Image (tube, helix red, strand yellow):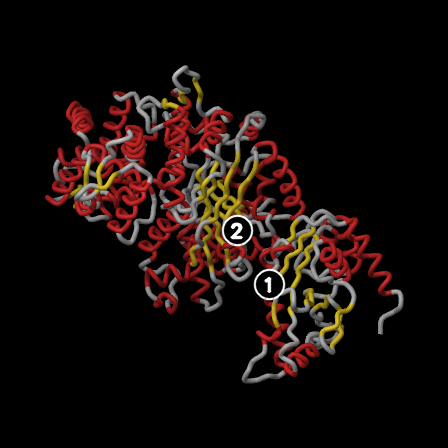
Amino acid sequence: MHHPLTTPLRALMTQLIAAWVRPRLIEPAPDALALEPSLPVVFVLPRPAASDAWLLASLTRRHGLPLAAGRRRVGEVTLPACVALPAQRRRLWRRQSRPEAPFRALIEQRLANPHQEVQLVPVSVFWGRAPGKRFGFWRMVAADSWQLTGRLRRLLSMLVNRRSVEIHFGAPLRLGDLIDATRPDAGLTNRKAARLLRVHFRRVRTRVLGPDLSHRRTLIEGVARSPEVREVIEALAAEGRPSTPRLQRRALRYGREIASNMTYPVLRFMDRLLRRLWNRLYDGVDVRGLERVKALAGDHTLVYVPCHRSHIDYLLLSYVLYHDGLMPPHIAAGRNLDMPLVGPLLRRGGAFFLRRSFRDNRLYGAVFNEYLHRLIARGHPLEYFIEGGRSRSGRMLPARPGMLAMTLRSFLRSAAGGHYQPLAFIPVHIGYERIIENASYQRELRGGRKRKESPLALLRVLGQLRQPFGRVSVNVGEPLLLADFLDDELGRGWREARETRPAWLGEVVPRLGESLCRRINAAAALNPVNLVALALLATPHHAIEARLLERQLGLLAELQRRLPGAPHASLAPGTPAEWIDQAMALGMVQRREHPLGDIVLADAAQAALLGWYRNNVLHLFALAGLTAFAFRHQPAHDLDALEGLLAPGWPILARELMVAPPASLREALSAMLGVLGELGLLGRSATGWQRPDEPLEAGECLDLLGQLMQPSLERGYLLLAVLLDAGPGRLTAETLADQSRQLAERLALLSGRDAPEFFDTRLFVSLVESLEQEGWLWREEERLMFDDRLCEAARHSRRLFDPTLRHRLQLVTRQA
């Protein structure tokens, strides 16, 4: 029986909360809830909490949802419009059984009358977010954690966290969907409803708060005393190294050096600080694809693997996840960032630090592996950069095996124990219209030394904040479920294995890295700057008529719309004219007025910068550019001839640009020819396709599109020229890559191409590896071997080049 003051008090508190609280996040938006208007709604909270009920009542009234206040009559049953799952009661001497869920009367009515359907809507409310750590007074008042909150703590939290409240609605659950037709039992269905709702609430709580964290000191001591670390300590002591106690103290020191110390006050401080930073630094942050993460968070260990373009990456992804109601990850950061002032702040924001190399330090390796394993085994979200460092060229760098191998070993170790949580890699592409490291990247590409990170260097960077940096895009790609990947690669036999370092590990890790790199690239963001860079740098002197540039930008955009270069790539909104204006506003290009039509151009410094942004997205137009290049010298092709011409080199190019090759090159080429024909760049002939006769501008656009792939094709030509000239068994891979790089540098100087990334040594090393993987090359005593198949393929592929270009490349190789 309710006290007579209950209803007036509830109404008063609902009004007070409505005036006091400003929710930070409501997910999904109230108007996006898939509610059936004709069916009654009962809201369900995970536990009894008057503050949550009052807040929900005010929220439903404000957004026009079925009211969560008062009592609701459903057929012959009357119950509160907002109910809570009962909490388990405890006594000092024993734990009592959990009371029955409040849905039994509704279920009995639904069994008697199938027309009396009800929608149960689960609602999770978080008054701030704290991942369950001890951090002084804040632990009492700051936020929700895994510990249940008392009345005093909840009251203080309501006062402190009025602007940090998150409300998460679940999908409506119909009682009829829960009833088992073979066993229509009300008690069984009531328990089933409660169990499903508790699973949902735990998934949401894990997604938002992350797993329950132990105290940092306890975690470090557990790592240092683990059997794996003790085994290494005993082995080192037996070899006459320092004594066992001294090695144990060293292991603890390594643990303190590595471990993060994530604290909620710092997360809240960073959230507010970064919100101001992004508002000052960028015009906005565009986020796409987070629904893929939310579908997995809660019952998967998430490992975020973003591309690494800028130091801002560390902060940006954590901010985006926190701001969207997901737990920020623990981030693997280089020890060089553990510097005064910055290091402690990053550590409390979730960073854990690792040395660049610890192959020769077995104890450090054991401690780091054990720490990483405990994070993964407990389900903590992680983030690391598989490229190993920031990309100075703007390309996606090949994946380093270190962190991937350690993650895979940890997963296998848990699987061998029979209690592992599914693990999902989350590829993320971060695209900038302008980065703060522009100048330093260009200096390093020209041979300058990388400057050491320091607080003073950070202050120099802060001085750039008044400059415009445009917008930034955070695109989430297709998640990779590790168990499914291993099933595809190895069959299901790996699930029965009990080894943590199986023989196949060395082969699978590189393939895992390649797959993740392709998935990151598949989520690339086309923005005004990289679109302008694609078109402008395809011109001989980095100058183009504004009218033609607008047409070429429109062509690139239309290609992406009709035949996307990747499944999750995004295209900037706006028109080509607006994109040019944005690139000018960011200082990337210039516009010269002319009586016959304005000209857009880039000087040498601007062109070098634009190369970095072009390389971010060049892979999206790999097949389009290669197809267009084939029509540069030969005006007509049929599909059979075109496939024969491009097939030998396409896998090499696809691997260099890290794009997933199509299942059928022939079908992909057929679709590409059709689109180019629809856009007026190719015309139908009696036997196939040909360059357009009119208008002249269409042929120029086709040449500009083909020019995108010319640098990659030139590098391949130079490398093959060096290899074939030397003959089989004469060169090592390192010598071939170095001689090819020297030729590329010479070609760049002779042709006036100020683009250091054109002769980047890593590109030639990657080319050699690709030729080996495709079977064109193999090694005997470290010398590169090949046969007539490569010679014939090289002669065949040279037909791609027109005589003038072929003569220039031959001249460079002969003069060398």
Find numbered disc 1 in the image and state the secondary structure of the residue it sits on. Answer: loop
Q: Which residue is at a point 63% across and 36% down the rendered structure image?
A: 276
Out of 345 and 107, give the one closest to the viewer.
107
Find numbered disc 2 in the image and state the secondary structure of the residue it sits on. Answer: helix
**Kind of residue at badge 1:** Ala
Number of other residues with Cα within 10 Å of mark 1, as a class: few under 14, some 14 to 19, many 20 or more: some
Image location of residue 245, percent across then percent down: 52, 52
Image location of residue 627, percent across then percent down: 26, 40
Out of 382 and 117, give the one closest to the viewer.
117
Q: Which residue is at a point 51% across and 31% down the rendered structure image?
A: 453
Tell me: 302 left or right of 92. left
Residue 290: numbered disc = 2
- Evaluate if marks 1 and 2 touch, with contact meaning CB atoms under 8 Å apart: no
Residue 171: numbered disc = 1
Whether residue 630 is visible: yes
Q: Which residue is at a point 79% across and 55% down the rendered structure image?
A: 155
Looking at the rendered image, the quarter that the C terminus falls into is: top left
Whether 696 is drawn above or below 795: the answer is above
- Toward the top, the furthest residue is 595
Q: Which one is earlier in the sequence, the residue at label 1 or at label 2?
A: 1
**Kind of residue at badge 2:** Leu
Q: Which residue is at a point 34% across and 57% down the rendered structure image?
A: 505
- Give the CA separation, mark 1 to mark 2: 17 Å
